[in-house]
Amino acid sequence: MENKETHHNKQSIANFAAIKTAIANNEEKLLKELLADQAMQSIEKSYLIDLAKLGNNRVILEILESIPAEK
């Protein structure tokens, strides 16, 4: 049986995978939708910024850099 925390973790993992895919595909609009009103851990944010640097899309980088980081 799946508890509430397990369900939340699965959703978080699926959302993070979708964010990585949006970055890789240079989908700026989708990325904004996936990140709407979210904060993330500094290590996750750093990873996504490094990933975005590979694609060299300045708009994607700006979106990611504007995400508030959790402490």
Image: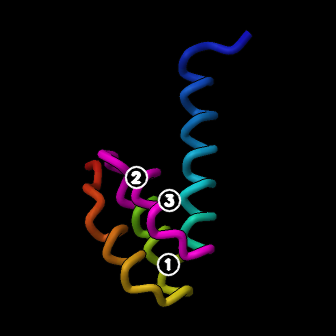
> Is disc 2 in contact with disc 3, using a CB cutoff of under 8 Å?
no
Q: Earlier in the sequence, mark 2 or mark 3?
A: 3
Q: Nearer the viewer, mark 2 or mark 3?
A: 3
> Is disc 1 in contact with disc 2, using a CB cutoff of under 8 Å?
no
CA distance for labels 2 and 3? 9 Å
CA distance for labels 1 and 2? 14 Å
Please name the amino acid that badge 3 sits on.
Leu
Query: Residue 3: image x %, image y %?
Result: 61, 13
Question: Quadrant of the rendered structure where residue 37 is?
Answer: top left
Question: Quadrant of the rendered structure where residue 13 is?
Answer: top right
Disc 3 designates what residue? 30
User: Quick check: 25 left or right of 48?
Assistant: right
Q: Secondary structure at mark 1?
A: helix
Q: Earlier in the sequence, mark 3 or mark 1?
A: 3
Residue occupying image coordinates x 58% and y 35%: 11
Which of 66/4 is in front?
Answer: 66
Residue 35: image tag: 2
Asked which colour scheme the image uses, the reply is rainbow
Residue 52: image tag: 1
Residue 38: image tag: none
Q: Residues within 10 Å of mark 1 (few under 14, many from 20)?
A: many
Please name the amino acid that badge 1 sits on.
Ala
34 within the magenta span:
yes
Q: Quadrant of the N terminus?
A: top right
- The boundaries of the magenta stretch are 25-42
Query: Residue 10: image x %, image y %?
Result: 63, 34
Q: Residues within 10 Å of mark 3 (few under 14, many from 20)?
A: some
Q: Nearer the viewer, mark 3 or mark 1?
A: 3
